[in-house]
Amino acid sequence: MKTQTETVTERSLPSFSISRHGLFIFLCLLPALLLVTVFIYYPLFKGVVMAFQSYSLFDLSNIEFIGLENFKTVMADSAFKESLINSFYWVFFSLLPQFLIGFIVALLLRRKFRGRGIYQAFIFFPWAMSGFLIGLIWRWMLNGQAGVINDLLIKLNIIDTAIPFLADPTWAMVSVIVANVWYGITFFAIMILAALQSIPDELYEAAKIDGANYIQQLFKVTIPYILPTLIVTTLLRVIWILNFPDLIYSLTNGGPAGSTHILSTFMLEKLIYGQNYGQAAAVGVILIFILLFFSIFYLLATKFNKAGDF
């Protein structure tokens, strides 16, 4: 016969059970969870571990933990410091024109006009192309001997001799940024246009009744309404630009003399040419921390929690 204490204890113990409906949902999600774990979280964990190992393909018999040695070696490299500075120029001077031009394009596309669908298709088409393909196209256009841009500039009497866009260190950085600006405008145009189409017309009608002109409507109605979208898209674009080695690799391969290397291309160089997976992983970990701290700072600075629903 059970005592009163044992009866109370049995009643207070929580019973774990899963309904058939819950089990069905779990089984449906299981393949996706396995894929994400195998192809994202495991490589991420493995990469972090390798950052603390002497992992070189030239000496696979001597893989061991070496603490922070890879980080010290990488950060002492002058090419790393140059890549870090280039990364700032690459992100800032790519992001600002992309955002401004993309915003203007989205405002223009919001208005109804004949052939708007076809025009939108031409505007959005570059986003469907791969970064490597765009890099190859721009590489041909910027060729110092047979490039179409040099040919146009000479025929317009803007320059007398061809500019070695991809062979000169200064022009090379400008060239890859211009190509990236052209590519990224589409992203902002798509995202901002979608946000603009969600603004109720009643807000603009009320603003007009109050006597607001177009500029006042832009800053009092449009931007506050789509501010959450602007914050998120800008943050995503910063992350993508910093992790976007495709264009630089296909245009200049980080050259000339490493003048167009950013952190992600510097990491690839360590990986492909140096065969040093440990140092490449260390650069990757540094890149993750830079993006993590920037994201936290950016979201706090923009007061994203007060901007509205995302």
Image (tube, grey):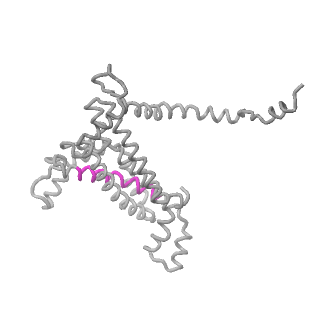
**Residue 202 at what x, y percent from top left?**
56, 70
- Write the residue at 58% across / 32% down: 30
263 vs 228, nearest the viewer: 263
Could you tell me what secondary structure mostly forms the magenta stretch? helix
Direction from residue 36 to residue 271 in the image, left or right: left
- In the rendered image, which quarter is residue 234 located in? bottom left
| Direction right: furthest residue | 1
Queried whether the magenta region covers residue 179, the answer comes back as: yes
- Write the residue at 50% across / 58% down: 304
Direction from residue 21 to residue 214 in the image, left or right: left
* Residue 216 in the image: above or below residue 162: below
* Residue 254 in the image: above or below residue 156: above
- Write the residue at 46% across / 57% down: 231
**Residue 77 at what x, y percent from top left?**
24, 40
* Residue 96 in the image: above or below residue 77: below
279 vs 260, nearest the viewer: 279
**Residue 158 at what x, y percent from top left?**
14, 61
| Direction top: furthest residue | 61
Direction from residue 279 to residue 155 in the image, left or right: left
Queried whether the magenta region covers residue 24, the answer comes back as: no
**Residue 12 at what x, y percent from top left?**
78, 36
142 vs 124, nearest the viewer: 142
Direction from residue 18 to residue 286 in the image, left or right: left
Quarter of the image that includes the N terminus:
top right
Query: Which residues are drawn in magenta?
Result: 173-193
The number of numbered discs placed on residues in the rendered structure image is: 0
